[in-house]
Image (tube, coloured by chain):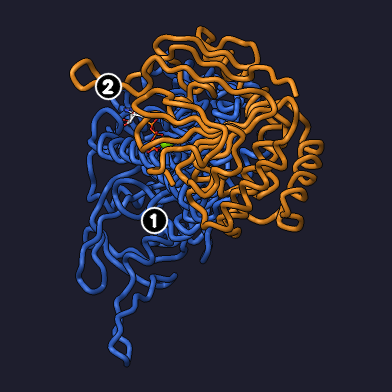
Chain colours: A blue, B orange
Amino acid sequence: MLRLALNMLFGDTAKLAMLLCGLAFSALLMAQQTSVFFGIMSWTYTPVVNIRAHVWVSDPMVEQANDAKPMRDTELGRVRSVDGVAWAAPLHTSFLQARMVDGNFKLITMVGIDADTFAGAPAQLSQGQIDDLRLPNTVIVDEWGAQLMGRQVKGPDGKITTVPLKPGDVFEINDIEARIVGICKVRRAFTGGPFVYTTYDRAKSYTLGARRTLSFMLVEPVAGVTSTQLCERIENETGLKAWTTDTVIWDWTDRSLARATFWWFWKNTGIPFSFGTAVALGLFVGIAISGQTFYSFVLENLKYFAAIKAMGASMRVLSAMLFVQATTAGLIGFGLGAGMAQAIGRVMIEKGMPPFVMFPQILIATLVLTMGISFVSAIIGIVKVSRVDAATVFRG
Amino acid sequence: MTHTIAVAARQVDISFGSEEAKVIALNHTDFSAHTGELIMLVGPSGCGKTTLLSVIAGTLTPQSGEIEVFGQRLDGLSQEELTTFRRKNLGFVFQSFNLIPTLSVVENVMIPLLIQGASHAVAKKKATEILEKVGLKGREEGKPNALSGGQQQRVAIARALVHEPPLLICDEPTSALDKDTGAQIMEMIRELSRAPNRCVVVVTHDFRIFKYADRIAEMEDGKIKRVVDDPRTLDPTYL
Ligand SMILES: Nc1ncnc2c1ncn2[C@@H]1O[C@H](COP(=O)(O)OP(=O)(O)OP(=O)(O)O)[C@@H](O)[C@H]1O
Ligand SMILES: [Mg+2]
């Protein structure tokens, strides 16, 4: 009978297509919305990802990675003297206005890294060399920034195109020249515009002699000391705050700067709420659509289930039939929806906008929800079929 | 020929609706049918034919009275017991065929066997055999909607008889069909259901098929008014 149940499901291609569209659309909506949500949230701790180091040290009042409470340069020495520190390098981060050749201003995230060690330098340069940062008045701009700050040119056909910045191009930060020597590939951030890397000392001059410029210290433990152990030692001995830099959302530790940043945005901004609402809406619409389509499938077949019931099929058999139909439709619908979400996600990742992080957990949750919807629909169907009077089969 | 009682309904009452707008469908109705016979239930619309049929089929439980089918009392059985009873003893032919459009012809016919627990292969073999008997060889894998009304009703007959039930119940089996097709269907029902232990109950409005009946029970206002052997002795208003 279960085989017939499946044939009943697959027998009507038009209805099946409707049902699968509903399920797939809702699975897509759930997976897609959640992935974009996590994508946006993962942008909040982009500095931790882009500026690579095992341990970050900050002023004790700092709450998250985009929050700089500059310290005195002398703190560096104190940290270096903590047992277990292999090296410690200064890091400056600030949000500044960059003035383009055409006079327009753009917000940038200035990152000043230690010129000796280049600790925290971008992992990958698509043009130029990191060593050239040692030349006077030089910066490295990320690819997004190169595009964003590029020059608009009007072609002969009147179309406006953007010529991205390239090594050799020049702009100004606080009236000081910034000559590009490299273009790097880094992740985009939620705040502060594109990343512009320079040396720590030069960052001081770009910020026009701010009293303190040491936003963070990047620290490497010696072999045999874990990041967590080192964090504890630094905090005990210096009174500063030390963070680990694990960014894997599912098992980040209590000391993770990424985690603190994630939750800081969660608590202090409206983003999680507005996006959370979109996710909830996606879930809700998804549940409604797939529940509704499966329910109408059951309704359309109710007459036939009644006939089968009249012929003597027990509720156990009828329930099994409905479950098989619901779970099969649910699985296929999930497959299609998740596939579409993946495909759309791939395009998004390529474009870098909007951010998209589809954790396997999102897919599992979507699967569980889709199957849950199918189960509930099946149960509603079963109740419906159990209520249907077998006698109705005699009525036209 | 000795006939035993196949179906006996005694003093059956059925009413629908609330106290103020009560419709009495069966009113102390007595009815009986024997094995080996084809009995027709006739009467004006609304007189209770379908209701009586549903009671005999165990799909409707009477408010009072006794129903006995092949010696088994149906009144007082639970829904589950009634389901088991129907599975073993009943074949249905409906006015509107009630074939499942998304299943193939042979799959439709397999259903009674499958719900009795037969394997897919056995059910398919038996269903194919009976489809050949009703003249539908070669149409097994098609969908019911691709067939004419008469052919669809033949599929329904095959489905009703594939598990060889002792009681065959037909509600207006010919009313959706033209005259000749209706006659063919009745020929088939008569031929295939002729078995000493089988009882066939046919509800109909269609006087042209009265001649296929062994006996005709005439209903009026929820009661059996009379039972005749010869259709020509019926009230001429039916003819
Ligand atoms: N489920 C129901 N709810 C309310 N009234 C019903 C129901 N089923 C039948 N009736 C009423 O019971 C009476 C008998 O109905 P039934 O269907 O048995 O008549 P019938 O003889 O089969 O008529 P027809 O020849 O039109 O099929 C009618 O008055 C009908 O309106
Ligand atoms: Mg009727």
Q: How far across and how far down the image is residue A176, in percent?
A: 26, 62
Image quarter for residue B73? top right
SS class of the residue under badge 2? loop
SS class of the residue under badge 1? loop
Mark 2, ligand 1, within 8 Å: the answer is yes
Q: Using residue A177 as the reference point, say whether residue B103 is left or right of it.
A: right
Q: How far across and how far down the image is residue B222, in percent?
A: 37, 24
Residue drawn at x 78%, y 32% is: B119
Whether residue B59 is visible to the viewer of this picture, yes or no, is yes
- In front: label 1 or label 2: 2
Q: How far across and how far down the image is residue A373, in percent?
A: 45, 32
Image quarter for residue B160? top right
Whether residue A290 is visible to the viewer of this picture, yes or no, is no
Mark 1, ligand 1, within 8 Å: the answer is no
The correct choice, above or below, for A292 with respect to B196 in the image is below
Q: Give the label on residue A316, or none.
A: none
Q: Looking at the picture, tell me which residue is in the foreground, B208 or A99.
A: B208
Residue drawn at x 48%, y 40% is: B204
Q: Looking at the picture, tell me which residue is in the foreground, B143 or B239.
A: B239
Q: Give the label on residue A353, or none.
A: 1
Q: Amino acid at mark 1?
A: Met
Q: Which residue is mark 2?
A: B17
Residue drawn at x 62%, y 34% is: B214
Q: Quadrant of the C terminus of chain A?
A: top left
Q: Looking at the picture, tell me which residue is in the foreground, A289 or A44.
A: A289
Mark 1 residue crowding within 10 angstroms, few (<14) / some (14–19) / many (20+): some
The correct choice, above or below, for A325 with respect to B222 in the image is below
